[in-house]
Image (cartoon, rainbow, N blue to C red):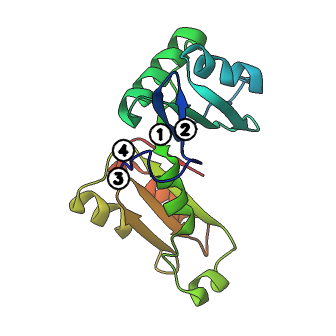
Amino acid sequence: MRTGCAETHRRCGRVGGVRELRYLAFLRAINKGNRRLTNEQLLAPFNELGFTAVAAYQTAGNVTFRCADDDDAAEAQIEAALVGTYGFDPPTFIRSAAEGEAIAAAQPFAADELAASIGKLQVTFLRVAPSPAAIDQAIALVPLEDRVVVSGRHCTGCLLRASATRSCRSRRLKRCSAR
């Protein structure tokens, strides 16, 4: 679901007469093991690509930026830049600001389900929307007391035992990143 820039000025900027959308980038395992990037190092490839309004939340791999490219093109450029700059290929998941806001605003679980959870609601971003068969296979792995809802290119888990998102992250749903 890609939205146009005319929605709001919060999501859209103009640089040199070109419309730019605000995007959210989720980089999986960016600081894993002995690999530790500073915030400045994390943002450098985004700035070098010419993206604007680049910012990060800590160094967890959550980056916001503006660019005129579509999300698929931005995703490919970021992954190539990270490989070229740092020599590793963290899976990158791009969502428009509108998609991010819709995910944050969604309430896929009833209040009683949330109240009974361990207080941890997680969203797992997927590269592509999984097939119905892949969804069925992944959900079959989720314990009965946990809840998972798959919606397009993400799944949301309401956890009673911190296991539901592991099921969504299984190979059945391919490349993904949980937040």
Q: Nearer the viewer, mark 4 or mark 3?
A: 3
Instruction: Give coordinates of residue 75: x percent, y percent.
Output: 43, 30
Report which residue position mark 1 lands on: 94
- Above or below residue 101? Residue 64 is above
- Circle nearer the N terminus (4, 3): 3
Q: Amino acid at mark 3?
A: Met
Q: CA distance from mark 4 to mark 1?
A: 16 Å
Q: Are marks 3 and 2 in contact (CB under 8 Å)?
A: no
Q: CA distance from mark 3 to mark 1?
A: 12 Å
Q: Nearer the viewer, mark 2 or mark 4?
A: 2
- Above or below residue 101? Residue 117 is below
Report which residue position mark 2 lands on: 25
- Circle nearer the N terminus (2, 1): 2
- Circle nearer the N terminus (3, 1): 3
Q: Is residue 142 visible?
A: no
Q: Are marks 4 and 3 in contact (CB under 8 Å)?
A: no
Query: Which mark is on residue 1?
Result: 3
Answer few, some or many: residues within 10 Å of disc 3's Cα (few below 14, many 20 plus, some between 14 and 19). few
Q: Nearer the viewer, mark 4 or mark 1?
A: 1
Instruction: Judge left or right: residue 171 versus residue 11.
Output: left
Q: CA distance from mark 3 to mark 2?
A: 16 Å
Q: CA distance from mark 4 to mark 3?
A: 20 Å
Q: Are marks 2 and 1 in contact (CB under 8 Å)?
A: yes
| Closer to us: 92 or 104 | 104
Residue visible at 47% across and 39% down in the picture: 93
Q: CA distance from mark 2 to mark 4?
A: 18 Å
Residue visible at 51% across and 80% down in the picture: 109
